[in-house]
Image (cartoon, grey):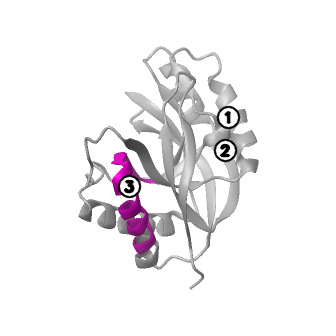
Amino acid sequence: MPSSSTSSVRAFVAVELPDDLAEPIADLQSAFAEAAGVRPVDPSQAHLTLTFLGDVAAADLEAVRAAGERAVDRAGVGPFDCAVEGLGVFPSLEYVSVVWAGIGEGTEALTRLHGALEAETTALGFDPEGHEFTPHVTLARMDDGRGKARVREVVRERDPEFGRFTVESVALIESTLTEDGPIYEPIATFDLEPE
């Protein structure tokens, strides 16, 4: 399904966070403000990726939308509560590339959604994730190791609770890369039906 067509979009499927989580995310990011090489994400665009698709040919978007609908049905997950809490890094504190907020309550439902989405999208020809699914919200990326000591200190010393919300849908999102960072735009939404 992935195509080398010139008309394509960069896309992923995610849970969008409510606006009221932007402030606690920004507060935590301020702890990295002086750390060189740390690039925070825009708190208003923070999200929880369920599966990353990469480049999707415009002609294939309808098939991807249909796969998303099938996956949400297949997962059998109704609306659920999700708690964004704690901190972690990928791949390790020795070599930090991503700083993230973790998920407490809601992990099982998110994992079921991820599994169903990956099954449907790999059937279309998209590559599966090359690692175990860890539900998280990316807070910052590290361009180099200059700020690693500060990141380690914050991750070890803090155990923040960013907030809770009810997940009622997941979205197929287009990512447009710009000089000022990516811009995310939902292009389809899949509602979670009450069980």
Q: Are marks 1 and 2 in contact (CB under 8 Å)?
A: yes
SS of the residue under disc 3: loop
Residue at (26%, 46%) from the top-left corner? 3
- Main SS category, magenta section: helix
> Which label number is shown at residue 110?
none
Kindly tell me whether residue 94 is visible in this rendering.
no
Disc 1 residue type? Leu
Q: Which of the 4 image quadrants contains residue 29?
A: top right
Give the camera-side residue of 185 and 156. Answer: 185
Kindly tell me whether residue 117 is visible in this rendering.
yes
* Count of labels in the image: 3
> Which label number is shown at residue 28?
1
Disc 3 residue type? Phe
- Residue 143: within the magenta? no
Q: Quadrant of the N terminus?
A: bottom left
Decide which of tag 1 and tag 3 comes sooner along the chain.
Answer: 1
Residue under label 3: 133
Residue at (57%, 59%) from the top-left corner? 104
Residue under label 2: 160
- Left or right: residue 81 versus residue 49 is right
Q: Residues within 10 Å of mark 2 (few under 14, many from 20)?
A: some
Label 1 – label 2 distance at C-alpha: 8 Å
Residue at (69%, 27%) from the top-left corner? 30
SS of the residue under disc 2: loop
Give the camera-side residue of 60 and 150. Answer: 60
Give the magenta-colored segment's residue range: 50-70
Disc 2 residue type? Pro
